[in-house]
Image (tube, rainbow, N blue to C red):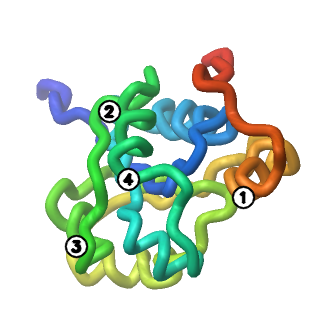
Amino acid sequence: MQPSSKKKLVMAFGTFDYFHAGHESYLSQASKLGDSLMVIVARDDTVKKVKNEKPTQSERKRLREVAACKYVDKAMLGSLDDKYRVIKKYRPDVIALGYDQFVFTYKLRPFLIKEKIDAQIIRLEAFRPSAFKSSILKNSTQKCDPEPQKIPAD
């Protein structure tokens, strides 16, 4: 019997406003869970609904920054009307959640069961959340460097 040639797809989600070392750590951890990492960047309107304010950076800029990350194989904007559409379409093997991601996740397991998607849900570790959290960086005079700090891949 030959081993399966199907690549293990990992899917990660986020706003990624002011891409920083915490985001890079999240994506590095996620990339280690499979063969290919697909990242879904939240739309401006979705962020506004969830956080009651638009992100500082446009969705296009945030998408470009995520796509440029060395751990990311594919990056795309999320759907405006169906937050789970991309999961239905690509049927990931693993869904990687950040330590602080709880919106839209409480219905995730029932959705996967209903759609017969056999994906693991894995919550990843925080990387210095007191220093690297977009809301902290946004509200401080300290802004991210244009070139994010590279985190060793171990």
Q: Position of residue 69 (x, y in %)?
A: 45, 26
Q: Residue furthest right?
A: 130
Q: Position of residue 102 (x, y in %)?
A: 59, 73
As helix, strand or loop, the secondary structure at mark 2 comes to strand
Residue identifier under label 2: 36
Label 4 is placed on what type of residue? Glu
Q: Does any portion of residue 97 appear in the rendered image?
A: yes
The residue closer to the viewer here, 80 or 73, is: 80
Q: Which mark is residue 94?
A: none
- Marks 3 and 1, how far apart at CA: 36 Å
Give the residue displayed 22% in from the left and 73% down from the top.
Answer: 116
Q: Earlier in the sequence, mark 2 or mark 1?
A: 2
As helix, strand or loop, the secondary structure at mark 3 comes to loop
Q: Which mark is residue 116?
A: 3
- Marks 2 and 1, how far apart at CA: 29 Å
- Marks 2 and 3, how far apart at CA: 21 Å
Q: Are marks 4 and 2 in contact (CB under 8 Å)?
A: no
Q: Which mark is residue 135?
A: 1
